[in-house]
Image (cartoon, grey):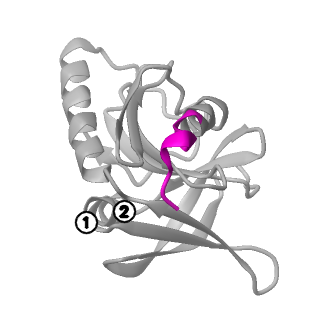
Amino acid sequence: MAIMMGQRPRLTAVLILLLPLVVQAENRNFGDWTVGVNDEGNPYAVTANDSGSILGKVCLMNLDKCVYLLGVPLRCEAGSSYPTLINSTVGAFANTLLCSGNKTLDHYSYFFDNYDLVEKTVLVADRVAVALPISGDNFRVAHFSLNGSSKALVLLEAIVQEMRQKNVPDRTEPAGVTGDQEL
């Protein structure tokens, strides 16, 4: 679902409240995506849907890694992996989500295991849906707009490059962070 103009404050509230990885007052918007730097000094590009779930890319400067994350109200255990199906306007594929162990309000954060497939989808598709199996034969599906994602990721890369030139990394890896891209 596209975020309407009146929903921009909601997106900022989602970014501030949902995940410790994505918190920053100053940011730039590109379509339905927001780019900024969180309190830990990690640049990010994210989008939120109407349900308050988020999809985005965060670059962990202390590890020289970028990861795609998903924040949804679906409980998980830190370090555990969960199957997922990703469908978009350019195709579908299976992936694995790794639980980070971070929870804010009722949202848990997950990292996508196959960085490259998610990156290609986010750069090319118009919309994406992430389906996670839950009890019985049910699924929870989170739909996201990718309007503005390409421009947001270009700015994110520029921020990362600028910060790399100034930053000396601390190599402490948070729980569940794998399937990453070296910066």
Q: In the rendering, at what x and y percent does residue 6 appear? A: 55, 41
- Pinpoint residue 140: horizontal percent, then vertical percent: 68, 71
Can see residue 44? no
Asked if residue 7 is among those painted magenta in the image, a careful observer would answer: yes
Residue that appears at 31% across and 68% down: 125
Question: Magenta segment range?
Answer: 1-9
Residue 143: quadrant of the picture: bottom right
Residue 109, percent from left and from top: 62, 47
Residue type indicated by callout 1: Val
Q: Answer with left or right where residue 7 lies relative to residue 102.
A: left
- Residue flagged by tag 2: what amino acid is it? Val
Looking at the picture, tell me which residue is in the foreground, 33 or 161: 33
Quarter of the picture holding the C terminus:
top left
> Which is more toward the observer, 40 or 122?
122
The residue under label 1 is 124
Instruction: Name the residue rendered at 78%, 46% in the picture.
Output: 106
Precedes in sequence: disc 2 or disc 1: 2
Q: Give the mark toward the camera: 2 or 1.
A: 1
